[in-house]
Image (cartoon, grey):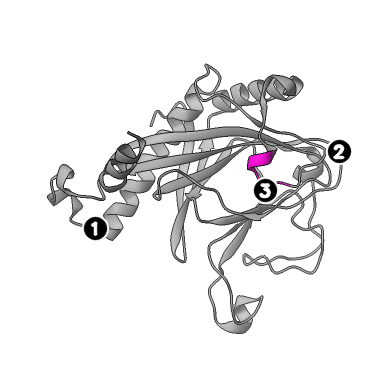
Amino acid sequence: MSKSLVSSMEAHDCIRTTYFKIKLSDEVLAGLQEYSAKVLSSPSVYEDYTYRLAGHIKKGKQLQIPLETEETKDLLKVLSSAALQYYDNYLSRMMPNHTLVPKEENPHALKGVEIQDLWINSYLAGDYNPVHKHGTYSPVGLSCFIIVGVPDSIKNKKPSHTASKAGTITGNDHFDGHTMLKWGYNYGSDSPFDSLEYSQQEYVKPEEGVIYLFPRWMDHAVCPFDGPGIRVTMAANINLWTNKYYEIYKNSSE
């Protein structure tokens, strides 16, 4: 991946899986902010994606945007490259000797990466996204969201309570505008310290220019916020076509 497009990429291991946190370069972020503003200023030009999505966004917009545009080409390069690295890391863990098997003979070898769809979400005060997961055509798929714009009402929010990584809180406003990532369930108690369970979820504060990339099955949600301004994100689904599923998909589409 070109270093000029991203400034950092971190793998965060959690129970069952891994998610990537990727920081875009300032130049790429500025381009996405300009493009998002253009799209949101002319919503009638773009397809309303609300019918495909879970969001309770009553004041903002959910708009599908074309994949092949000059404004999003760098973003798609980042997503494709990150998806390749994500799967390579996963395959190396699951099959440490996978490089010893000829690629064409390994059903789990990656044949290609395809960005399935891309859309913009704008949230105003009170808008939120309930717990949901995404879908991809390939059973081996990734999803992601990109933080494009964060209002000062979220940036400057000072927590009124101390929160655990598990998301155990007593205040209603601590996670204004945050995204919850959930990869499992704590059965014994809401607090892992009461049940000797490791945390199964994490709340992440939105940071402009940050991408979160994770398996398509991972539950996530966006908390509402109170205050002026617009919270803007992009989101995408990514098909990872392994030898096994590429042939099935190819045969079914012929």
> Disc 3 designates what residue?
54
Q: Amino acid at mark 1?
A: Met
Q: Amino acid at mark 3?
A: Ala
Mark nearest the camera among 1 and 2 is 1
> Disc 1 designates what residue?
95
In the picture provided, is 204 more to the left or to the right than 114? Answer: right
The answer to which of marks 3 and 2 sits earlier in the sequence is 3
**Closer to us: 128 or 201:** 128
Mark nearest the camera among 3 and 2 is 3
Distance from the alpha carbon under mark 3 to that under mark 1:
35 Å
The answer to which of marks 3 and 1 sits earlier in the sequence is 3
Residue 181 lies, in percent from the top left, at 59, 56
Point out the stretch of residues depicted in magenta: 51-55
Mark nearest the camera among 3 and 1 is 3
User: Mark on residue 122?
Assistant: none
Q: Amino acid at mark 2?
A: Pro
What crowding class fits label 3: few (fewer than 14 Cα within 10 Å), some (14-19), or many (20 or more)?
some
Establish if 92 lies above or below 154. Answer: below
**Total labels drawn:** 3
Q: Residue at x 71, y 23 (%)?
A: 37
Residue 236 included in the magenta stretch of the image:
no
Magenta stretch secondary structure, dominant: loop
What crowding class fits label 1: few (fewer than 14 Cα within 10 Å), some (14-19), or many (20 or more)?
few
In the picture provided, is 183 more to the left or to the right than 247? Answer: right
Establish if 184 lies above or below 248. Answer: below
Distance from the alpha carbon under mark 1 to that under mark 2:
49 Å
